[in-house]
């Protein structure tokens, strides 16, 4: 699953599209609120497909779901590369988010089923590390193409490997087997009954905490390259390059998060990593020298990506195995709703103040999530 995640990490293109916001503003003649729709609208489209994706992940073999996901994404990227209309650009990005939901519900539930439960945090850390490597490759390739051929070529470049891997996963015997051996009782469980199985106290508290955390994370990630360009004075390609190095730190962060969760427990590991993000983000708002900005941002990125192994482990720990794909989907519904609404809200706050407001805005939500996490047993 790790190699599949490397070549199919749709968050590559979420990060790419938000890194492109300064370029899109100029090319399509938009204001900041209009440009924020490249993050908001696709997230809303993904939100609508979360629950159906999880329901399918619990009932179909992984190879079928992953094939559909990668095929949709590859075709969507080709459309993005060719469109000259902003709304068609946004529509094509919507399908990349739909493919993302199909992938994550199936991929994560498959990993949690086949991994040794005593090593679950470690397994998820490795899985997430591959995803962060894919994210880094996507955004760094954007920086390269911006300075050579133009931003559209990054979508053309990645469509080929993704479509090739779609054919490979369809014929994978290992992935086919993940759909076998489940009882008919699982397959026939009604959707609403499955949802009621996962909405226990622990999962509900966790979900609230993560909604609050995601508001802060989405706000700062959406406008980070814009901050680099407008406040620090970096070029668009250099801002994208620094932003793109973040997922490389995420490779180490994912492995560290898996190890930390294994040693101290998922909840404590998650609280510590969010606290690390708060401290580093607080410092970043005061940095102006390029080397300090880059260094502190990478420290922040490390802690931001470290959270994913504890998050995915907690979902696995608080949901039954028969509805685990649906459990991940419910989490992604909450995440997608936040990712859909936060960019516009944050852009409005910025319009009425200054762009540096993303720092106190995000920090407040990070701290609130840590407080809520303490209610989790």
Image (cartoon, helix red, strand yellow):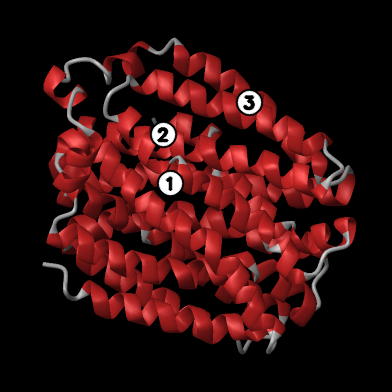
In this view, the residue in front, 329 or 294, is 329
Q: Is residue 53 above or below residue 219?
A: above
The answer to which of marks 1 and 2 sits earlier in the sequence is 2
Q: Residue visible at 62% across and 57% down?
A: 39
Mark identifier at residue 318: none
Cα separation between marks 2 and 3: 15 Å
> Where in the figure is residue 176, as x and y percent of width and height?
33, 14
Whether residue 9 appears in this view of the structure is no
Picture quadrant where residue 346 is located: bottom right
> Residue 191 appears at what percent x and percent y?
25, 36
Dot 1: element: helix
Residue nearer the viewer, 126 or 268 = 268
Is mark 1 in CB contact (under 8 Å) with mark 2?
Answer: yes
Measured in 3D between alpha carbons, the distance from the residue under mark 3 to the one under mark 1, in whole angstroms, is: 19 Å
Q: Which mark is residue 129?
A: 1
Check the image and report above or below for 206 versus 366: above
**Residue 272 visible here:** yes
* Residue bearing the label numbered 2: 2
Residue at 68% over, 52% down: 17
Question: Helix, strand, or loop for circle 3?
Answer: helix
Tag 2 secondary structure? helix
Q: Earlier in the sequence, mark 2 or mark 3?
A: 2
| C-alpha separation, residue under disc 1 versus residue under disc 2 | 8 Å
Is residue 102 placed above or below 369 in the rendered structure? above
Label 3 CA crowd tier, 10 Å (few <14, some 14–19, many 20+): some
- Left or right, 179 with reference to 285: left
Q: Are marks 3 and 1 in contact (CB under 8 Å)?
A: no
Q: Which residue is mark 3?
A: 161
Residue at 56 percent of width and 76 percent of height: 296
> What count of labels does the image hold?
3
């Amino acid at each position: 699953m790790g190699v599949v995640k490397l070549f199919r990490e749709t968050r590559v293109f979420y990060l790419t599209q938000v890194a492109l916001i300064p370029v899109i503003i100029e090319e399509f003649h938009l204001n900041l609120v209009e440009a924020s729709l490249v993050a908001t609208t696709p997230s809303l489209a993904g939100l609508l497909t979360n629950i159906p994706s999880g329901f399918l992940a619990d009932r179909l073999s992984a190879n079928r779901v992953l094939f559909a996901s990668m095929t949709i994404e590859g075709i969507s990227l080709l459309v993005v590369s060719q469109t000259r209309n902003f709304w068609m650009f946004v529509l094509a990005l919507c399908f990349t988010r739909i493919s993302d939901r199909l992938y994550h519900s199936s991929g994560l539930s498959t990993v949690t089923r086949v991994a040794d439960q005593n090593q679950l945090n470690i397994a998820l850390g490795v899985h997430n590390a591959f995803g962060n490597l894919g994210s880094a490759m996507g955004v760094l390739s954007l920086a390269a193409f911006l300075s050579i051929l133009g931003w559209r070529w990054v979508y053309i470049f990645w469509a080929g490997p993704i479509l090739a891997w779609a054919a490979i996963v369809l014929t994978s015997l290992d992935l086919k087997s993940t759909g076998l051996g489940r009882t008919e009782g699982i397959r026939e469980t009604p959707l609403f009954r499955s949802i009621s199985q996962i909405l226990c106290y622990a999962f509900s508290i966790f979900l609230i905490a993560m909604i609050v955390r995601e508001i802060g994370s989405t706000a700062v990630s959406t406008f980070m390259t814009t901050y680099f360009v407008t406040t620090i004075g970096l070029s668009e390609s250099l801002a994208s390059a620094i932003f793109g190095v973040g997922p490389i730190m995420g490779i180490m962060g994912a492995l560290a998060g898996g190890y930390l969760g294994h040693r101290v427990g998922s909840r404590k590991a998650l609280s510590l990593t969010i606290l690390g993000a708060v401290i580093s983000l607080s410092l970043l708002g005061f940095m102006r020298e390029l080397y300090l900005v880059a260094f502190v941002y990478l420290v922040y990125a490390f802690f931001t990506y470290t959270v994913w192994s504890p998050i995915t482990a907690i979902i696995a720990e608080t949901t039954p195995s028969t509805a685990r794909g649906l459990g991940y989907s419910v989490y992604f519904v909450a995440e997608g709703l936040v990712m859909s609404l936060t960019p516009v809200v944050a852009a409005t706050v910025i319009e009425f103040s200054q762009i540096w407001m993303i720092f106190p805005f995000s920090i407040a939500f990070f701290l609130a999530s840590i407080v809520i996490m303490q209610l989790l047993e």
